[in-house]
Amino acid sequence: MEYEPIIGLEVHAQLLTKSKIFCGCSTQFGVEPNSHTCPVCMGMPGVLPVLNKKVVEYTMKMALATHCRINEVCNFARKNYFYPDLPKGYQISQYASPLAEHGYVDIELNGGRKKIGITRIHMEEDAGKLLHDEHTPSSYVDMNRTGVPLIEIVSEPDMRSAEEATAYLKRLHEILVYLEICDGNMEEGSFRCDANVSIRLKGETAFGTRTELKNMNSFRNVQRALEYEIRRQEYLLASGGEVVQETKLWDDAQGATYSMRGKEEAHDYRYFPDPDLVPVVIDGRWIEEVRETLPELPLEKRERFIQEYQIPPYDAGVLTSSRVLADYFEEVAKLSGKPKAASNWIMGEILRFLNEEKRDITSCPILPQSLSELIQLIEDGTISGKMAKDIFEDMYTTGKGPQQIIEEKGLVQITDEEILKKAIEEVLAANPVQAEQYRGGKEKIFGYFVGQVMKVTRGKANPALVNDLLKKMLAGS
Amino acid sequence: MKITRAEVEYVAHLARLEFSEDEKEKFTFQLNNILAYVDMLNQVDTTDIEPVSHAIALNNAFREDVVEDSLNPELSLANAPEARGPFFRVPKVIE
């Protein structure tokens, strides 16, 4: 029997505002516990939350980037439950009327593209952070995160494999980071994902019983947890068992999902409109204003790069993986006029050097201007490809431009035929036996001579010229 | 009767409240009275009237994204039943 998994994801993304959603406390991460709190975010009686306008604008950006319909009127609601990280006893969220609905994103798979539907995007406040004491029956509460703005993005149950779910998640992540409305840091929890998973026999139309997965704090863990859970459900059904509707936590160390104890009872959140917050009304003009601020999005950029710069789809994918990297590439491509060379240098050397130091392109010591100069120096024959690699290393460690390094080290490529001829004569004189072997038909030995000439000229000889001259001189004398 | 005793018990549980048997009886009776009273609103003809969630006609009350001073952490913790260092301390909650 063949089963088909059905996956839907709920993603929470922290918005990059300076202040919280309903009060002026800072959203800065990693500060002294409870130092960014006030009567509003701690839920003191009698306070009045006031909505941060930027939260609405950021949410609108995501809505537009994911082809959602923005509702003319949306409201906030109270989601009631008790938990120590929730000081008010309710979370301010949106329920009956979210900011946006009915969108989609395209994901790219081996077999082409697929549309994944987005049910809704709504605004809400984050809860506080709990730390559990290992030794005493206590938990500690830090309210700095309480009231940090979140958007929740709910997908349709459109994904049919762990791979598709991961591709969708990466797409959302990429868009949020491109829009500069979320830093996308999964480890610090600014981008979190819960998954709803069920399976059914292929061909069946009704959904099976689903479980909800939590606690997956990396793309890899999302994929692993989903794969595990799909296998678990398949095994259960195949062996005559039943899937129980429950919430399961992913345990990274064990590589398994396990049931959450103590939270078995069904939730009853008793949502109702929050009387403290008035409706948000968004007119067409505001939507257009926000639309105008949208940057080019990753998928569009990828297509443009392939068209405009004639680079392979794979290159375009890597280069558009971040907006800053894409900008870097474009600058080098334009300045040097050699997009493919620019792509090769960035995908090869630049990313390798940066990865080794776990840095990203924002802290790259080589400016686009310098890299494009280096590419031009190779093009016009001033330096060889091999010299360029050495110069590149110097550029990376010192931050100097290629011209300066070439001057300081006297690295200009030798293109003077007389000088090269002399060097070749020297090499041939020193290696009479090998020269005889070459003339006797052992042509493989040619590379040896090139190497020797390079050695004599300390790598500065123009390789193409050396090849030409060597051939002539080996044949001639 | 709109509200049963079982519903009073359920709502009490959600609110983490414990009542005696007498109280449950009393609240069932009182809640039914309140709902019956509010039910009078149904006598008003609301055809052609848009539902609203607020009594005042006001939209888009925003603040700009500007950081303001937070409370001094000592003050934040001043009312905590229990605190430890810079944290609120609560009975352990299991994930």
Image (tube, helix red, strand yellow):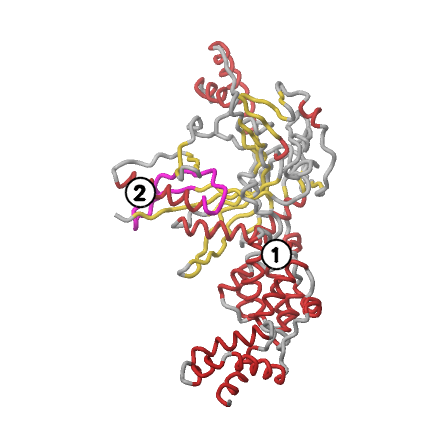
Q: CA distance from mark 2 to mark 1?
A: 43 Å
Residue B36 appears in the figure: no
Q: Which residue is mark 2?
A: A234
Q: Residue at x 60, y 65 (%)?
A: A390
Structural crowding at the residue carrying mark 1, measured as other residues with C-alpha within 10 Å and reported as few (<14), some (14–19) or many (≥20): some
Q: Residue at x 57, y 80 (%)?
A: A426
On the image, the x and y values in percent for residue A149 come to 61, 40
Chain where mark 2 sits: A
Q: Which residue is mark 1?
A: A361
Q: Is residue A255 left or right of residue A351?
A: left
Give the farthest residue toward the bottom. Answer: A476
Q: Residue at x 59, y 32 (%)?
A: A128
Is A208 included in the stretch rendered in magenta? yes
Q: Amino acid at mark 2?
A: Glu
Q: Is residue A228 left or right of residue B19?
A: left
- Quadrant location of residue A462? bottom right
In the foreground, A277 or A373: A373
Is A389 included in the stretch rendered in magenta? no
- Quadrant location of residue A41? top right
Residue A401 appears in the figure: yes
Magenta-tinted stretch:
A196-221
In the foreground, A55 or B77: B77
On the image, the x and y values in percent for residue A450 come to 52, 77
On the image, the x and y values in percent for residue A7 come to 41, 46
- Above/below status of A189 relative to A381: above
On the image, the x and y values in percent for residue A332 come to 63, 67
Mark 2 or mark 1: whose residue is earlier in sequence? 2
Structural crowding at the residue carrying mark 2, measured as other residues with C-alpha within 10 Å and reported as few (<14), some (14–19) or many (≥20): many
Give the farthest residue toward the right. Answer: B69
Chain where mark 1 sits: A
Q: Which label sits in the foreground, 2 or 1?
A: 1
In the foreground, A85 or A218: A218
